[in-house]
Amino acid sequence: MKKSILSLILFLFMMTPSFSSELIDVVNAFQADKTALQNFYSNNESEEYYVRFSKFYADWSKTVKNIDFKNLSKDGKVDYLLLQNLINKGDYFLQIEYKAYKEVASVLDFTGEINLFITERRRGKRPVASQLAKAFDVAGVVIDKKTEQLKSKPFKDWFAADKASKIVLSFEKSLKEAYEFYYSYDPDFTWWMEKPYKQLSEKLKTYEEFLKTNYAKTSVKDDGSGIIGKPIGRDAIIKSLSYEYIPYSPEELITAAQKQFEWCKNEMIKASTELGYGKDWKKALEHVKDTYVPAGEQPQAITDLYNKSVKFIEDRDLITFPELTKETWQMIMMTPERQKINPFFTGGWEISISYPTEDMDQKDKLMSMRGNNPNFSFATVQHELLPGHNLQFFMNSRYKSYRQPFDTPFWMEGWALYWEIILWNKQFPQTPEQKLGMLFWRIHRCARIIFSLKYHLGEMTPQQCIDLLVNEVGHERANAQAEVRRSFASGDAPLYQVAYMTGGLQFFALRNELLAKGWTEKQFHDRVLKENIMPVEMLRILLEDLPVSEDYKTNWKFSTDFK
């Protein structure tokens, strides 16, 4: 009897999320303050913006330090560390941008009176239109002079030139907003300002375009791929990894990915041999690409894969799928414009299908169909839907939603990738085509770590990254170009592509630790989704009830092996 009671207590402990945190309101207040300031100081390339947000982070850092850490619950201590980490991370990258701003801010050192007009507009102060018109005219003359001066003194590199042009663009948007507030509503302003504004606006656009290209010829912006990104350098990579609670160096992660890459290649050779292609796995992969469904049948193919994976998971009782999430997911078709950045389907509340449209070239249509064949999609439908992103979104909006500011791709993408590892290990793929389809994505995730880190270390160019995906992974070239463009030119965080496999390995290592302590897979999976989003090392502290100090630093050397 006692044994049964103890077993029940252990079960309830593992299944029940820890007590509510004392810092829920603090985290919510931080996020609300940040949003309020972002809305008010909308020109994010201005001295005013950088100064105010520097103060914001400094003030909040003091607020957090004044919290009595020792008397917090475990949830409260983890939230304390997560909030402190979020503040430090935000300030670190703000200061990098502020430094870059100050180096080129002189491109707008003539706009003091106009900036006053912009800031006073927030409270609706009526400007003296006749004086403001003169300030606009003077600014136009100064722009012409500055343009001539800068022609003989280009920026040291394209990064500085790009920053300078963004400063002008951001100013131009703020000016437009202020002008449109008064124009047509204030007769005196409208009479005086229409022509001066139009002339200055046109000059600012020309000035912005000039600045963007005014850099030393020794600075290479485009390697020929047409993909323009910004390598952040080794120091920033190491800082970024520390903010994600990853205790490995970029070089260690690259080495681990290369090892996994070779494992994938060996497994692909096994599947290739099953198909009769021997060691020529690339030829076997071409065979798999030709298993695409005819135009118009992709939605049904996705539905069939969804049903198959959900049944497989539910038959093994691996996780709880709320009935409502199974009821409410749906599909949308990806626009042709978006497919240029993301050639494969994506997911969240719905699954966005990437497939040819009527106006695509015949060559591009075939590449899209081959790259989205059902066997390639075998690993990724559940990545996007259940138990991947759709279920994550569903649960995050219902459990501890205040933690969403702690958003990290190592949790979001890592969890979805983790399920690809689990399903492979449970023999979800049965045919060699299905195995090759899953391995194609596994090797792709390894390649993402290698090429994205080497790019940010300055060791690979975008074109070399494209060639790696085509020659070593087996991508169609158009799809490889879109993948690299997404990695470096879409606004994704520098470590985003690293997060898939690395986060998946973290979840896999955490799973193994908890299974060794008596948890079931279902208990682990259900509990994870009730804690909401955060770096996986912080989740480990909660699930394993580990000791944690106020000055905690990342120290979990999780296994980088997925077998």
Image (tube, rainbow, N blue to C red):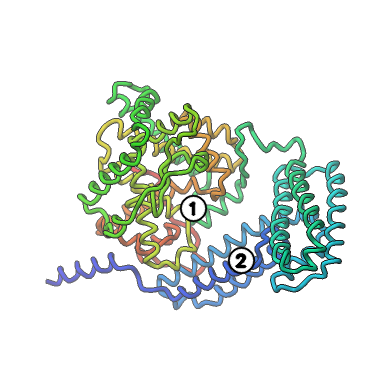
Q: What residue type is labelled 2?
A: Asn
Q: Position of residue 281 (x, y in %)?
A: 37, 25
The answer to whether one can see residue 240 in this image is: yes
Using a 10 Å C-alpha cutoff, classify the residue at mark 2 as few (fewer than 14 neighbours), some (14 to 19) or many (20 or more): few
Q: Disc 1 designates what residue?
A: 247
Nearer the observer, 92 or 153? 153
Q: Are marks 1 and 2 in contact (CB under 8 Å)?
A: no
403 is higher (above) or lower (below) than 284 = below
CA separation in Å, label 1 and label 2:
35 Å
The answer to whether one can see residue 450 in this image is: no
First of labels 1, 2 by sequence position: 2
Q: Which residue is drawn at 32% across and 62% down?
A: 527
Using a 10 Å C-alpha cutoff, classify the residue at mark 1 as few (fewer than 14 neighbours), some (14 to 19) or many (20 or more): some
In screen coordinates, is 536 left or right of 146? left
Q: Where is residue 52 in the image (x, y as percent from the top left)?
A: 68, 68
Badge 2 marks a residue whose secondary structure is: helix
Q: Quadrant of the C terminus?
A: top left
Q: Disc 2 designates what residue?
A: 39
Q: What residue type is labelled 1?
A: Pro
In screen coordinates, is 405 left or right of 304? right
Badge 1 marks a residue whose secondary structure is: loop
